[in-house]
Amino acid sequence: MYSAVTDNTQQNQGNRTKKSSTDHSLMPPCQATCPLHMDIREYVDLVAQGKIMEALQVIRDDNPFPSICAYVCDYPCEDTCRRCQVDKPVAIRMLKRFAVEFGGDRMIQVKAETTHRERVAIVGSGPAGLSVAYYLRKLGYPVTVFEADSKPGGMLRVGIPEYRLPPKIIDTEIQRLIQMGVEIKVNTRVVSLDRLFDMGYQAVFVAIGAHQGRKLRIPGADLDDTWTAVSFLRNARLKQKGNIGEKVVVLGGGNVAFDCARTARRSGAKEMHIACLEPRDEMLADAPEIEQAEEEGIVIHPSRTFTRIIDKDGHVAGVECLKLRSMEFDKEGKLHLDIIEGSEHSLAADTVIFAIGQCPDLNLFSGLSGLEVTKQGTIVIDQATLSTHHPGIFAGGDVVTGTASVTQALATGREAAFRINDYLQHRYPLAGKEAEENPLGDLFPETVETIRKTERLEPSILPTEARVKSFEAVELVYDWEAATEEARRCLHCGTGAEILFQDKCATCLACLRVCPYHVPYLDDSGTIQIPADQCQACGICVAECPAKAIVLRKPYGRQQISEELDHIVKAAAQLNLKPLIIGFCCQYGLSGTGTLASLRRGAKAGIWIVPVLCAAKVEAEQLLYAFEMGAEGVFVAGCGEQCARENIAFWVRQHVEKVRKTLAQIGLEPERLEAFNLSATDEEPVKALNSFTEKIGELCFASVITQEVKR
Amino acid sequence: MIVSERKPLAEIRRMIAPYQRLLTLGCGTCATVCGAGGEREVSFLNSALRVAQAKSGNETHTLSEYTVKRQCDLEFLDPLVEKVGDIDAILALSCGIGMQVIAERFPDMPVLPGVNTSFMGAVDEYGVWDERCAACGDCRLEETGGICPITRCTKGILNGPCAGTKDGKCEVSKDMDCGWILIYKRLEGLGQLEKMRRYYPPRNFRTIPRPKRIISQANIDTGEDND
Ligand SMILES: Cc1cc2nc3c(=O)[nH]c(=O)nc-3n(C[C@H](O)[C@H](O)[C@H](O)COP(=O)(O)OP(=O)(O)OC[C@H]3O[C@@H](n4cnc5c(N)ncnc54)[C@H](O)[C@@H]3O)c2cc1C
Ligand code: SF4
Ligand code: SF4
Ligand code: SF4
């Protein structure tokens, strides 16, 4: 049957970031919500362990341009993060940024070889176009990107302000694409798609985005000093000096409006106002965006509607407004305004920017038959194949969806690359490969109550005075300590306990009794159930189940520890260092990053560390097994004060006590086994460990456990 | 459920000394539930025996392990047929019943008890079991409000409480409830106090100290356990 130390045969020995055959984990909601379905849980956990390079590897597996997402992703994953139910979501985007910067993403080279003859043309070099290029190149196709502008990047380059996305980040990614063999033709506007086929391209991907800004249809909207958001931002980013006045009023309440106002602030405007229909607490922009804008002196005028741009001698002099009691969209999407009588007033301005949305500009393509366009001016595609009605022409990104998001564009690009591959290889599209799995359900209120609340750590941002002076990046990156701490807040959704061997379960109810989160329950038929969406993956029941019927869905527990232990015992046997001391040490937080290594260096004897993901997962048998394999001393080291859970020390000591009792019965000194808290501030870890090793040395002198073990 | 407790290691080592190849055999039912002889305990015990033999340096047992669903039914023992050829004795981690069934099934095979079969009982809290029934063969629970005076009264008297009861506790130990006070309260609750006023003629019992308790978990707070 199943045994503690020999059940590692089917374990994946290689790259631990790859899913092994024993990984039965379920998709957490963060991953399900991410347009790229990134394995967030995995990389966040690796960050928590201080394994930054491995975290970056996981990130790169699913994301062609992680450094860009790290700055500008609109992080829908955080909205569905199950930590929201407990306190605040895990700071997923900023942890990615940390991994990207500290893991050295800039240095990574991506190789691609040409294995196909069919050439693909990509129209537009925004995130959608670049993503298709990346994946088609990896699939072995020669690709050419046509870009109307002088520099590639699309909205990344001409929309999103520099203080949110430094241009050098885009440059690095473009450089990487060029190294992969992607051909990028800038200053090349495509005017006829038919021509591309004439030029020998066998498939075309249209990703021209949505660059046509909209204005309100009110008198004065076409005066000289009025702008659309896209044209204003574009001018600012391309450093073409426009006539930005001193008093700027932006109409609209979304993130783009704030981009405009904050850009105006950095471009020398003296007064910046944002006015919008929505009441203050319903504004569409993200909360940090609003907060930072106000710090920068931007004044917000919520609940307004606009009747006229005031014209003074052909120049803008202000915006005439009415106050709203309320606003509402009806079922048909029609807007109803409840205007406060006699609330007419005006906001003085010499520049007005309309930030009320944008749409694709398809007029560029004249004479192309078969391209179907919606009322909103977006291209119609088949959802399964991403193909337009014209064979060989595919489309994606904002030109299909209207302004969406960068990550959405990257995801469509990746999907499109696979569909274009299907098309060129005359294969039936293997759609649905990325089909949604059922995300985990909500936590029960009872479960929420038992989970320790931890404060979300926000990385710092540039002080206001510094940020308004230039276009320097506003957000700063975590330091090592903050990142590992924040990463530990993840609840490891969907990796929890599973009764793998129902037939072995004796229904002893141990799991039900020990679970700190009250997760296991008896169903009506008297069978024990461990609901996957409630389990917190602490592993306590796994180490207690007397029938060894429970495993963790991700092989974080018994198997991984046994494997590491065997590995270390072998390595130690080769070196034949004595006395052999084995320490099972928690890898999370600082203990995983610095403390452990310095401990090993600092301590006097040869200490071998078995890394574990939580000390409570070390089972009593494994402690004993270490002795069986020749250890003269064994210790378990938890992460101490910073532990994300509450009951760990208790269970570690239970396991330790059980083994100590047995050692005593054998006639060995119980002090050969010790439990430490590595990072507890009042303990000096090196000192504690040294006195432990000295003690073992003395005990060893008195009596050595013979190492020739017959099995 | 039948509650058992692993024998001290020294006793087990003495028992196995004459045999070279041993199969430590777990039971997947009661012995698993009470934490004395499930799959986990089987491998823990074997590991402990190996460490002990490494320490002593002059033993050379070969220890294998297996756990059946239930040792007290012959049918569950079939998978052992092919194993018994390679072993000299079975070290059984099951109650006395299981061990005897094994002995019956394999007449030529020595069976060694790895656990002491302690009592029939129920769980109080995780890792703590209390004796509840003495299998006296003449159940009187109807008269005593569903509380067994034989096991829950230290003296096992049938007409309690005795004069040693104080504040609901037994004179034998302040921590032990007086079984007869429990019975009284329960009958009071049921409105059947007249049952207290009857005389129950004596029966012949072995005098054994009761109730027993096993605490398998180390109690970190009080340091209290069975040793
Ligand atoms: C101001 C602003 C801020 C934003 N901020 C964010 C943010 O913080 N986070 C986020 O996720 N999303 C943000 N978005 C949305 C995001 O930028 C877009 O969803 C995304 O860029 C869409 O990518 P795309 O590749 O479809 O198109 P685009 O990025 O728009 O790229 C299209 C490219 O096609 C080129 N092109 C057009 N016509 C032709 C032609 N005929 N021939 C050749 N080339 C052509 C254009 O020059 C352009 O370079 C923002 C949008 C705006 C406007
Ligand atoms: S707690 Fe972790 S795994 Fe769960 S949704 Fe949030 S980031 Fe994802
Ligand atoms: S602890 Fe193990 S044997 Fe006991 S009920 Fe839970 S799964 Fe079953
Ligand atoms: S792994 Fe932890 S949280 Fe999950 S059921 Fe077991 S004890 Fe409960």
Image: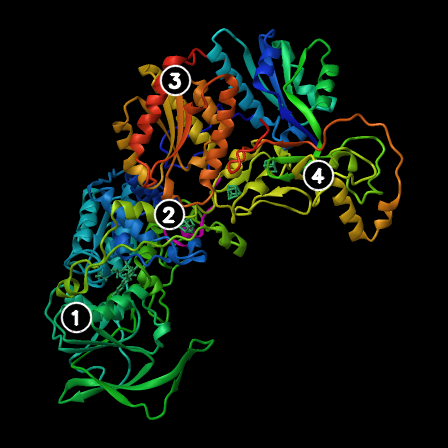
Q: Nearer the viewer, mark 2 or mark 4?
A: 4
Residue at 55% in and 41% down: A514
Secondary element at tag 2: helix
In space, the residues marked 2 and 4 are separated at their CA atoms by 59 Å
Q: Main secondary structure of the magenta part?
A: loop
Residue beneath disc 2: A40
Q: Nearer the viewer, mark 4 or mark 1?
A: 4
In space, the residues marked 3 and 4 are separated at their CA atoms by 46 Å
Residue beneath disc 1: A265
Residue beneath disc 3: A699
Q: Nearer the viewer, mark 3 or mark 1?
A: 3
- Where, quadrant-wise, is the N terminus of chain B in this rendering? top right
Q: Crowding at label 1, few (<14), some or many (≥20) Cα neighbours within 10 Å?
A: many
Is residue A367 visible in this depiction of the protein? Answer: no
Q: Earlier in the sequence, mark 1 or mark 2?
A: 2
Q: Given the image, what chain letter belongs to the residue carrying mark 2?
A: A
Secondary element at tag 1: helix
Amino acid type of the residue that numbered disc 3 sits on in the rendered structure: Leu
Q: Nearer the viewer, mark 3 or mark 4?
A: 4
Q: Residue furthest bottom?
A: A342
